[in-house]
Amino acid sequence: MSVGPRSSIVMALLVVALVTACSGSVLSQATTYAGITFPDGDISFADRVATYIEGSCVRCAFNDPRAALGPPDCGDDGCYACGGCDPCAVSLGFRLSEIDERAILVLEFVDNVLTDVPGADLFVYALAGRPAQVAISADGIRFVDVGQASGYPTGIDIGPFILPGEQFRFVRLKDVPGDEDMSACSGPAIDAVGAMGLSLAMPEMGEAAGSFELTTSGELRLVFEAPPRNILIMLDTSSSMTDPFEGSQKIAVAKSVLIDLLPQIPDSANVALRAFQRRCGTTRLVVPMQPLDRAYLSSQIMTIGAGGLTPLAYNIEQAGGDFQGSVGSNLIVLLSDGRDTCGGDPAGAARQLIRSGLDVVIHVVGFDLADDPEAREELQAIAAVSGGEYRPADTSEQLRNALRASLEVPYVIYDGSGTEVYRGVLGDQPPELSPGQYRIVISTTPNPIERTITVRPGEATTIIIQQEDGLYTTSVE
């Protein structure tokens, strides 16, 4: 059954339930690697690879990103992987300039978090003497640059870059353009990443009359129950996308933001990628509709160049075939920095797409269009025809937020005093809430949903979100 803005189906369940946890002690033993002692031992090191895109000239022996997980194992005795020893590190490769293929490695902490402590907070065990740009993130979407790493290890104090009390789970490492390097393990090589932060291995221990203290809290679980979502990302690659933008080019910024957002797309989604071609009446289906493969999609995004005209209407016309045979809700996310330059009618093409029977919503991101009201109006009309939203983006951060809002359904939780206590997206790991009254605002399109719930010990509250005739409604059980 096709699912879209005009279908009726239960889209999500918000389940509020209470959990009770006995506290215990964190079982960890301090360990020292290359002169750095980690009080929480091996728990301190990254646990999961979120993204890896290798750069140029990386031999197969050094392109396994799992080599960067866990504690360092290359040793600090001068025997480095890239000098002929076992491949105990993963290479990022090299690039000669900003327009070459970018190497990216994103690692996640699962049983600990990175936070500001006295002294250095983050340690990157980097080999080969080549620098890597380091950034951190709480959600894997918004990253904060904190410096470069090139030593074994490099210690970084994140305090100057963050707010007090902030916690981070993701570390992103990128290569830095430099001289040509044709060695076996070119560019920076990463053996391990460790955090001087908080261990999450066991709940914190409390003491009451010589026994363990019981702490009761409410857990908000968001279970997204819907057929797989089919997402077509449509990227404008016209000549204007090569214009300078924040020290780079607009196309480079757009590609980087798209890659950074891939970890936030649900695993169950089917994703396709379409890019403009240089001439009118041409288009390129870079990736056909298929189950989400983040590594492959990342590599294909990096192959996209820019130049030529803007056949907006033609690309929208071709999108109908991209969803053929798909089951579930259909979404097009269009990123463009201008008007159709091939004489087409983009809004008319979108209207015809829907009249053909395709149940689809088109969200449009207008990139760097503050001084082009005619282009904004044309793009806004595309979104309006399908019941989607138009979102402007005049900075890279606005672009990140606009694309994220287009790809996901964010929500915010406020306590009884109106203070924000949690911000996430449907599909996130659930937060824990103390008993009390909360207001939940879910940014569904076209109408946001707002509900007030009460968390009570021993009870559960379920909010059912339904979609009918293009609008969302809720009921509480």
Image (cartoon, rainbow, N blue to C red):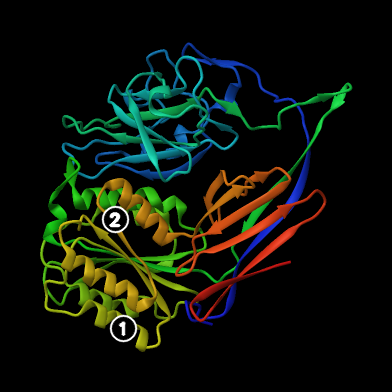
Q: Residues within 10 Å of mark 2 (few under 14, many from 20)?
A: many
Whether pointer 1 and pointer 2 mark residues with C-beta atoms closer than 8 Å, the reply is: no
Relative to the observer, which residue lies in front, 71 or 143? 143
Residue 194 horizontal/vertical position (percent): 49, 26
Q: Which residue sits at x=62%, y=49%?
A: 430
Relative to the observer, which residue lies in front, 94 or 38? 38
For numbered disc 1, what is the local secondary structure? helix
Say whether residue 283 is visible.
Answer: yes
Q: Is residue 57 above or below residue 305?
A: above
Label 2 is placed on what type of residue?
Answer: Ile
Viewer-nearest of discs 1 and 2: 1
User: Seen in the image, is 476 located left or right of residue 258?
Assistant: right
**Which comes before the other along the chain, label 1 or label 2?**
2
Label 1 is placed on what type of residue?
Answer: Arg
User: Seen in the image, is 237 located left or right of residue 357?
Assistant: left
Q: Quadrant of the C terminus?
A: bottom right
Residue 192 horizontal/vertical position (percent): 45, 28
Q: Which residue sits at x=16%, y=36%?
A: 96
Residue 123 horizontal/vertical position (percent): 44, 22
Residue 353 horizontal/vertical position (percent): 33, 83
Q: Which residue sits at x=87%, y=25%?
A: 211
For numbered disc 2, what is the local secondary structure? helix
Q: Which mark, by number, is residue 301?
A: 2
Say whether residue 99 is visible.
Answer: no
Q: Which residue is mark 1?
A: 351
